[in-house]
Structure formats: structure tokens, C-alpha cells
Amino acid sequence: MTNPHPKNAKGRKKAILKAIILVIFILSAIGVAQFTPIKEYLSAEGLGRLMEGAGVWAPVAYMVVYGVGVCLFLPGTLLTGLGAAIFGPYYGFVYVWIGAMLGAVAAFFIGRTLGREFAASLVGDRLKKYDDAIERNGFATVLYLRLVYFPFTPMNFGMGLTKVKFRDYLLGTGLGIIVGTFIFTFFIGTLKEVWVSGNWGDLISFKVIFSVALFIFSFFIPKIIKKFKKEDVAS
């Protein structure tokens, strides 16, 4: 008996194959970051040597490394901290933000290309309404999840599996990570400047105290955002 839906069957097999490739990619990425010589560069000294070798192209090299690192499931806090320590609080913020955006976009397209078809085939009537809601309110959804510090890399790949529009994902991510990125890079970069200068009296300067206050405040941002969201829903 012939298959009444050969195209559907063929399409499903293709979707499953892509999903398997996505899983293999993710597992391989984690393995590369954990069990290969690349791990040696994931320190302030290692990445610092790499940046020194890059010369005037160090910022570009760092941003590329950050983007690739995101796709390899390297901790964003590690990559951000290294960038702030190497480039300082201000340039560090710019390079970290661009690098994070490169990684977020790359991971999104990997998830969208390899996993969306299979994910769509698994979405039943109950989950479809959530998938449709993400498509309608993509910007607000992405922005909210970024502001409450939803795990960065899993969200990048995960959003690629949904119907969210790329434009909404890009804008929501770009705006959503600005505050946290600035606070963290400003905090690490400022402390690094004091460390390098050796002038420990600067620890009680306004700049350092302000950076510490911002860093502490960052832990309350998710709770504040959630509180405002609940109030909006209630009203």
C-alpha cells in the first residue's frame, strides 16, 4: 500500500534529520568547549594573550570569539567578565554587547534552520496557542525574558524553535541585554582599573561605589520586572 502523504512523510524525515543534527551540534559544541585546547584560552590570561596577538584587531577578534563562544555554550558571564577586564568598563561594554548580539543571532539561526520544522511538528493544539502568541507578541516576550535574565544561550537556540519574528527577536534581545551588560562590564572593568593602578584608596571613590551599587541592584531587576508585569496583568 502506498503512503497517501509521501511529501509529508518525506518532510517529517527531513525535519527529524535536522533535529538530530542540531542535537549533535549542541553536544559537540559543549564537548569542544570542555575537552579541547580551546578551554585554555578561556581565562583572563589566555584570552589576553590572544588579544595581544591580534594587535589593532583585538576588539574584532574578541567580538568574534564571544559570538562563537555563545554558540559553544560558554558561560556569558565568563565572556563578559573577560571582555570588561581586558578592554575596561566602557569599550568593554560596547564589545561585549556586539559580541553577545553576534552570538545570539548565530544561535537563533542555527536553532531556526535545524530545529524549527521538527518543533512545529510536535506542537499540538494546546501548545500552538503559545507559539502563536509568541509570534504576535515576540518583541515583548523576548524583552521580558532578557530583562529577567533567562539563561542566555538556551534562549537563543530555543527562540529559533518558535514562530517569533527575527526582527522582534533582534530588537528584544538588543534592548533587553543592554542594562545587564552595562552593569556587569562597568563593575568588573572598574575593579580591574583599581587593581591595575594599585591605588587601593580608589576603592572608596564614587565610581567604584556606584559600580558596586549597580551590580547589587542588578540582582533585583528580575523581581522588579516581574512585579510590574503582575501589576499590568492585574490592571
Image (tube, grey):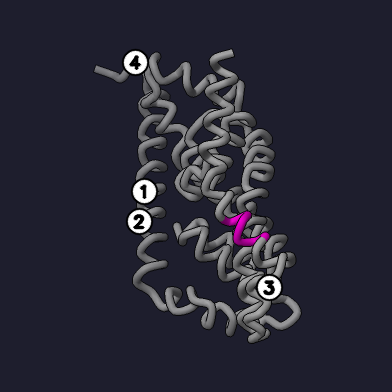
Residue labelled with disc 4: 4
Q: Nearer the viewer, residue 181 or 235?
A: 235
SS at mark 3 in the image: helix
**Residue at (48%, 35%) from the top-left corner?**
161
Kind of residue at badge 2: Leu
Quadrant in the picture for the C terminus:
top right
Point out residue 90 in the picture as x, y percentages from the top left corner: 73, 65
Q: Distance between the residues labelled 4 and 3?
A: 61 Å
Q: Nearer the viewer, residue 189 or 126?
A: 189
Kind of residue at badge 4: Pro
Instruction: Give me the disc on residue 78.
Output: none
Q: State the count of labels.
A: 4
SS at mark 1 in the image: helix
Point out residue 128 in the picture as x, y percentages from the top left corner: 45, 19
Mark 3 Cα shell of 10 Å, populated few (<14), some (14-19), many (≥20): many
SS at mark 2 in the image: helix
- Does the magenta run of residues contain 225? no
Q: Distance between the residues labelled 2 and 1?
A: 6 Å
**Residue at (63%, 42%) from the top-left corner?**
176
Kind of residue at badge 1: Val
Residue labelled with disc 1: 23
Point out residue 52 in the picture as x, y percentages from the top left corner: 65, 84
Point out residue 68 in the picture as x, y percentages from the top left corner: 54, 62
Q: Do the residues labelled 2 and 1 touch (CB within 8 Å)?
A: yes
- Does the magenta run of residues contain 211? yes
Q: In this view, does 28 lie to the left or right of 117?
A: left
Residue labelled with disc 3: 87
Q: Which of 204 and 45 is in front in this view?
A: 204
Kind of residue at badge 3: Phe
Point out the stretch of residues depicted in magenta: 210-215
Residue labelled with disc 2: 27
